[in-house]
């Protein structure tokens, strides 16, 4: 063991870790270029080549992640920051590409690239002869690249880049069947939610630069995960934590941004599984775990997280029970679990939420991938049992009838959350902007109709 | 070539850059019945682009200010510095791509003639810092845009609005310039006349750039004018150039009017992006996005740090490239299907999937997609303005949020929905594919490897923040690092 530890000393393995980190980022990115550029140049690849290229990219990234896991495990997950260079710099401002390999990022990247690999294999058959086959794999590769970038990020700048790629690929996959009006509406709604919450992450980056002069995590935190401590003073730490919580509410579908998630199931099943059952839905939890020292330094933020998570879990539990389609029910199931993970993070736990994320993601993505075969599975179960399986009793059965009815109505209306957001925020804003636009058009039309030379100034016929 | 004096080389390149489009315009005017005006226009713009790159390479080798001719108020008649060397090839390249790709039906001989004449005036404008020449060339460029818009079928309302607005802008600019020349703010001890002149010039810039509340002409121009003309009026950002030449480098520090512009720019960006959310047709969507993105440039001009200025110039290039790409795709789509509305999904995806991909990428490239130049530009401008104006950073963030939603909504509005069964099917043309691919390569190339551009902009910005001087010699070179006063 001592020999292994000596071989795996950080000084000896730094170059290896750096190469592995680069491989994890480069493999899906190269696959993306490989399948993305030919269609733009009018030479789309065949289905088999497309899925194999993306699969090779994910497999390479997965293998690199496994090797890195082994190397880091051999030395007790001592964190390693890989400096890939300076993207650009101006005076004292430098956008550096720093990546972190530690006890949080390495297991997570193993799990995320592994899932991407599985979904890639599933989708290659599931979407056979689908007109948007290549588009799906391009977006899957964008997602994989963004996910690895976010997970391995060592600074807010890199993290934001990955976060954006996840959001854009998610939106375009929700609107994958863009000939359906519902898919288009769902995609726009998801994107609006993402963009609103992105304000939090961008503003957090701004605050971090203001507070410590950099967005690098090693300037914000000291030590490796899960024992890192916060280097930011209390007031900016609280502000940073609150902004990060706001940023994560959207992608994790927490109250009051829950409405988009069931609609997002309009996308193809493989993308629903990997985004809303597994990885995208937990991206917020990952960011909070990465910035957990800030929550430690800001108890207010911790309690806010517990409150939001509890309310979301209760809301999703109630609403999920009255859904009439399987994918919506699973979406609310994901939402409830994400709420519970928020509670765990808010309580200051570190390893438990990570385990919860991984186990929930694996189970939920399996459920969503199997959802198109749900009736077949049910018939198999009934045939095996020789009859209908008995329905279990719920805790709501013990409640008085009036309470049950009230909860039922509340659940049917999705807790009035969407109605409140629409009436209090969306509609007033839309009315205001519509009115301003109408005034502008009227003013411009009036100015455009002014004729200085009388009626002879006629338009030429189009 | 190696034996040539850099100043002579730059002068020759500048002359070629202006003369080529002017000659092509003259040729088209002479052969007004010419069937296809594309070849002379493309040839002229290729010459301009090559001249621009020659100018850029010469300036990069010896980063200094080349000036020649009569001087007035701190600016020479022929003046080439980092801003000219960077912006001229960029603007010429955008126009070249537009002329090389837009559908034939959009290129009438008359419109092309006026567009080339306007382009020549704009390139001439980039080559001067002389206040009166700036004013005159700006007026000539606006006149060409107005005439081409007026001659376009259905373009007269837009031409009238443009004429009112540009007329007001030119009057303010002329009065302000005269007052600034009478009481120069470039020298210490400037009185109220020079200060009032500066505010008038700033008002002219507000109008010319389409800042709130003088922005209505931009979407109207995109809706009523031919696309190359609308892009010629917006991509070069003549107002920002005038602000750089006339309002930067005052003796008493940063001019207050620049600070006002820097506040109004991000506010306009947010307002424009919010308006873009509710637009009902594609042309007006592009118009609102155009004035929203171009307004951000002014956020960087009021800074005392070169980084803010470089951020502004970077936004200038990034938004121009993105706008050109969206414009090319919009022209290709409208060439096939007529004007496109956004109220209901138009189902154009299967008509032209490659155009859908290009539209999305160009749209996202304008709102800070990671890996594109706008991501770098936003980072620079936010980081630069943070030190002095925190609210500017917040407004920039808000504008990118709204603009992003508008782009995605617009994309789904055009390409989403059931396919229109009665519409003819047209694959993307090779020239459109090549043009879009080249533009995309430039956007991503500069986004992924931004260091050369950022370094060039850094070199360009440092001298701008120093005071200009009145030099007696007809030709002088100002080496970097040497104080000008």
Image: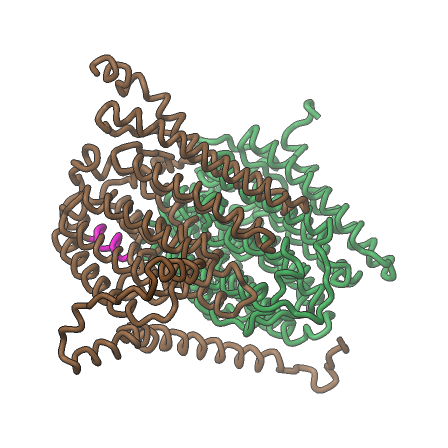
Front residue of B55 and A182: A182
Q: Which residues are magenta?
A: A239-246
The front one of A33 and B269 is: A33
Q: Position of residue A138 (x, y in %)?
A: 53, 47
Question: Majority secondary structure of the magenta segment?
Answer: helix
Where is residue B106? Give x, y as percent.
74, 62
Q: Splitting the image into 4 quarters, where does residue A408 fall?
A: bottom left
Q: In this image, A460 relative to B411: left or right?
A: right
Say if B185 sits above or below A17 in the image.
below
Vertical order, A98 against B149 (above or below): above
Q: For residue A351, what is the image quadrant? A: top left
Residue at the (21%, 80%) spot, across then down: A406
Whole-percent x and y of residue A120?
48, 44
- Residue A321, quarter of picture: bottom left
Query: What's the colour of chain A in the image?
Result: brown
Q: Quadrant for the N terminus of chain B, please.
A: top right
Q: Is residue A240 magenta?
A: yes
> Residue furthest toward the left?
A299
Residue A77 lies, with reference to residue A452, above or below; the image says above
Check the rendered structure and report the hue given to chain B.
Answer: green
Question: Which residue is painted at 45% across and 32% down in the image?
Answer: A60
Q: Position of residue B319 (x, y in %)?
A: 52, 53
In this view, the residue farthest toward the top is A3
């Amino acid at each position: 063991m001592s020999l292994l530890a000596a071989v795996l000393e950080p000084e000896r393995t730094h170059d290896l870790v750096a190469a592995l980190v680069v491989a994890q980022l480069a493999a899906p990115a190269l696959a993306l270029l490989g399948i993305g550029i030919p269609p733009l140049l009018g030479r789309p690849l065949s289905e088999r080549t497309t899925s194999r290229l993306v699969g090779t990219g994910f497999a390479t990234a997965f293998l690199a992640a496994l090797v890195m896991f082994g190397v880091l495990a051999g030395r007790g997950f001592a964190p390693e920051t890989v400096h890939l260079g300076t993207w650009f710099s101006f005076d004292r401002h430098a956008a550096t590409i720093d990546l972190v390999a530690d006890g949080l990022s390495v297991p997570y990247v193993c799990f995320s690239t592994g899932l991407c690999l599985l979904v890639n294999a599933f989708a290659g058959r599931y979407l056979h002869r689908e007109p948007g086959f290549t588009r799906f794999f391009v977006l899957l590769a964008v997602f994989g690249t963004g996910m690895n970038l976010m997970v391995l990020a060592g600074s807010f700048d890199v993290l934001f880049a990955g976060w954006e790629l996840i959001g854009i690929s998610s939106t375009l996959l929700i609107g994958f069947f863009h000939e359906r009006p519902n898919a288009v509406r769902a995609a726009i709604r998801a994107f609006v939610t993402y963009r609103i919450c992105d304000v939090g992450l961008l503003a957090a980056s701004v605050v971090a630069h203001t507070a410590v002069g950099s967005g690098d995590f090693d300037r914000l935190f000291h030590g490796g995960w899960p024992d890192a401590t916060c280097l930011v003073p209390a007031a900016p730490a609280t502000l940073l934590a609150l902004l990060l919580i706001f940023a994560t509410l959207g992608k994790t579908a927490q109250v009051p941004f829950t409405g988009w998630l069931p609609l997002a199931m309009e996308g193809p099943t493989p993308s629903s599984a990997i985004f809303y059952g597994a990885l995208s839905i937990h991206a917020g939890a990952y960011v909070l775990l990465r910035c957990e020292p800030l929550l430690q330094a800001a108890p207010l933020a911790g309690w806010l997280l517990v409150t939001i998570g509890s309310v979301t879990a209760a809301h999703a539990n109630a609403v999920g029970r009255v859904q009439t389609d399987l994918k919506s029910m699973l979406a609310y199931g994901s939402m409830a679990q994400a709420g519970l993970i928020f509670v765990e993070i808010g309580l200051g736990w570190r390893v438990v939420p990570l385990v919860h994320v991984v186990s929930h993601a694996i189970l939920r993505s399996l459920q969503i991938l199997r959802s198109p075969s749900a009736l077949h599975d049910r018939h198999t179960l009934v045939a095996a049992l020789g009859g209908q399986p008995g329905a279990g009793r719920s805790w709501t059965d013990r409640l008085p009838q009036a309470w049950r009815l009230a909860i039922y109505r509340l659940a049917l209306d999705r807790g009035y959350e969407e109605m409140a957001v629409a009436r209090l925020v969306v509609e007033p804003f839309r009315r205001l902007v519509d009115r301003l636009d109408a005034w502008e058009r009227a003013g411009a039309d009036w100015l455009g109709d002014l004729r200085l030379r009388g009626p002879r100034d006629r338009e030429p016929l189009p | 070539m190696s034996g040539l004096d850099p100043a002579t080389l730059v002068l020759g390149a500048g002359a070629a850059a202006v003369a080529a489009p002017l000659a092509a315009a003259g040729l088209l005017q002479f052969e007004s019945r010419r069937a296809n005006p594309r070849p002379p226009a493309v040839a002229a713009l290729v010459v301009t682009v090559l001249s621009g790159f020659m100018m850029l390479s010469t300036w990069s080798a010896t980063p200094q200010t080349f000036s020649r001719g009569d001087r007035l108020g701190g600016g020479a008649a022929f003046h080439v510095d980092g801003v000219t060397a960077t912006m001229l090839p960029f603007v010429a390249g955008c126009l070249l791509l537009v002329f090389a790709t837009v559908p034939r039906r959009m290129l009438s001989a008359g419109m092309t003639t006026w567009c080339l004449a306007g382009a020549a005036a704009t390139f001439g404008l980039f080559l001067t810092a002389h206040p009166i020449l700036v004013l005159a060339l700006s007026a000539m460029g606006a006149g060409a845009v107005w005439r081409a818009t007026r001659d376009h079928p259905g373009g007269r309302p837009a031409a009238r609005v443009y004429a009112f607005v540009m007329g007001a802008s030119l009057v303010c600019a002329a009065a302000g310039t005269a007052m600034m020349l009478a009481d120069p703010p470039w020298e210490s001890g400037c009185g109220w006349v020079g200060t009032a002149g500066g505010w008038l010039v700033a008002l002219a810039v507000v109008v010319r750039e389409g800042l709130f509340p003088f922005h209505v002409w931009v979407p109207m121009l995109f809706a009523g004018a031919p696309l190359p003309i609308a892009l010629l009026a917006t991509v070069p950002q003549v107002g920002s150039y005038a602000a750089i030449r006339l309002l930067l480098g005052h003796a008493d520090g940063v001019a207050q009017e620049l600070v006002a512009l820097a506040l109004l720019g991000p506010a306009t960006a947010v307002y424009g992006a919010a308006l873009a959310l509710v637009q009902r047709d594609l042309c007006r969507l592009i118009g609102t996005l155009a004035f929203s993105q171009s307004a951000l440039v002014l956020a960087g001009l009021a800074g005392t740090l070169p980084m803010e200025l470089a951020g502004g110039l970077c936004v200038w290039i990034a938004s121009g490239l993105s706008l050109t790409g969206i414009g090319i795709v919009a022209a290709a789509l409208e060439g096939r299907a007529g004007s496109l509305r956004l109220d209901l999904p138009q189902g154009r995806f299967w008509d032209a999937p490659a155009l859908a991909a290009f539209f999305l990428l160009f749209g996202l490239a304008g709102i800070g997609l990671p890996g594109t130049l706008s991501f770098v530009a936003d980072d620079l401008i936010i980081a630069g303005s943070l030190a002095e104006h925190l609210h500017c950073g917040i407004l920039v963030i808000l504008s990118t949020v709204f603009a992003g939603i508008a782009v995605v909504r617009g994309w789904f509005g055009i390409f989403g929905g059931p396919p229109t069964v009665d519409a003819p099917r047209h694959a993307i043309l090779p020239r459109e594919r090549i043009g879009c691919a080249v533009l995309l390569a430039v956007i991503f190339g500069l986004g992924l490897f931004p260091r050369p551009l950022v370094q060039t902009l850094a070199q360009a910005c440092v001298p701008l923040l120093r005071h200009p001087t009145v030099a007696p010699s007809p030709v002088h070179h100002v080496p970097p690092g040497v104080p000008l006063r």
